Image (cartoon, helix red, strand yellow):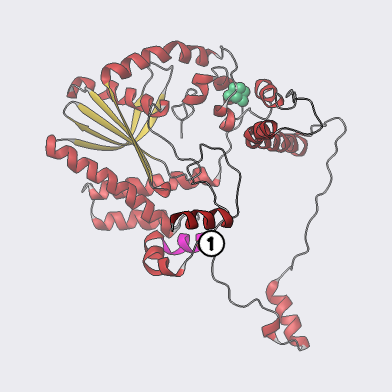
Amino acid sequence: MAHAILSASGSSRWMACPPSARLEEKEPEKTSSFAEEGTLAHEIGEQIIRYNNNEFTKTTFTRRLNKLKKDKLFANEMLDYCDAYAEIVREKYLNAKKITPDAQLIVEQRLDFSSYVPSGFGTGDALIIADGTVEVIDFKYGKGVEVSAIDNPQMKLYGLGALDEYEMLYDIQKIHLTIVQPRLENISEFTITAADLYSWGEYIKPIADKAFKGEGEFCPGSHCMFCRVKAKCRAYADEQMILAKYDFKDGPFLSDIDIADILNRASDFKKWLTAVEEFALDQAVNHGKDYPGFKLVEGRSNRKYLDQDKVLKALVDYGYEESILHKPKELLGITAMQKAIGKKAFEELLSDLVIKPTGKPTLVQESDKRPAWQSEDDAKKDFQEVI
Ligand code: SF4
């Protein structure tokens, strides 16, 4: 798959830190099972939408779906989530048709926004074009972070691409940008006028030009999380090391404010350390790099059976009772079970048979959406105040 140097998906990064784009370009792109899973889900989602839109027969649909199901990353729950995404697209399309009978639904459309970003293009998962409006729907299969469509630069770049393509034909005045993230039950929507989107496009032009040339200031921040050079980036390291230089107040112990400040930075700091460790290991193992004071050794490993069937046979032949050699039958874990039978079947058959025990108290930032934890004593006090 071709990738733009200034991609829409990486736009929050190169807009905040323009030199990152050219530096990342030189690094090999690492694919992950999550990314491959996302690609497969997009292919399945596309086929469902096209079938719902009568683009081919049920036989063709079944044949294509069966082929995709052979992928090692396929799980039944994927079908449920892709169905959920396709259903949202269908509903939106039917609603658009009520207003504009010849509204168009287009899937997997290349969107060229190179009038604003040098060589910039991306793919719109689903587009609905009606009189005066275009809607760009982006399917996100990940469930790590909930993504908002509000003022989202990736979505706005797709919007600019859609505007450039369809503006003349349909007199587009409004652009709806929608993110569908079914595994988090997240549907996030944002609407912007064509005039506002154009002026945003003009605003980012000089930033994109700098990024394309590899110029501009390094600017570390939350956008560094997925930067391919973060493990060796000096600006990001400087930012992380601010913690080490933190000017704690006098006295033998840290104050509550000091501890809160450390907690605030801990998560990013730990991730950065892990990234540096992984980078250094890769360099040492695969590129023969020597780091002063360090050497490569063989890590710890656990014993394992060479051949489980032969082990069992040897023990049974010797006279051991087979029942003491096996674990009793074990059910799949909850997540694996949902993957195996799909979300719908899981909810229909098992919702009364699955409980969620109270979790251990965890310290998180105040902005976290979960309600504050109550100790048993607090709960009792609250109860007594009510009665
Ligand atoms: S790690 Fe952050 S500061 Fe460094 S190049 Fe990447 S985006 Fe820029």
The quarter holding residue 227 reads: top right
Residue 45 percent across, percent down from the top left: 35, 47
Neighbor class of circle 1 (other Cα within 10 Å; few <14, some 14-19, many 20+) is few
The quarter holding residue 386 reads: bottom left
Residue, disc 1: 357
Residue drawn 73% across and 24% down? 246
Residue 345 percent across, percent down from the top left: 38, 65
Q: Quadrant of ligand 1?
A: top right
In the picture, measured across the screen, residue 123 lies left or right of residue 375, that is left
The quarter holding residue 112 reads: top left
Residue 19 percent across, percent down from the top left: 57, 17
| Residue 319 higher or lower than 297, as above or below | below
Magenta extent: 335-342
Is residue 339 shown in magenta?
yes
Type of amino acid at the residue the image marks with label 1 = Pro
Q: Viewer-proximal residue, 79 or 371?
A: 371
Number of marks in the image?
1
| Residue 345 higher or lower than 204, as above or below | below
Question: What type of secondary structure mainly makes up the magenta span?
Answer: helix
In the picture, measured across the screen, residue 39 lies left or right of residue 49, that is right
| Residue 38 higher or lower than 349, as above or below | above
Please tell me whether mark 1 sits on a helix, a strand or a loop. loop
Asked whether residue 202 is in view, the answer is yes
Residue drawn 38% across and 52% down? 81
Q: Viewer-proximal residue, 363 or 297?
A: 363
Residue 151 percent across, percent down from the top left: 38, 26
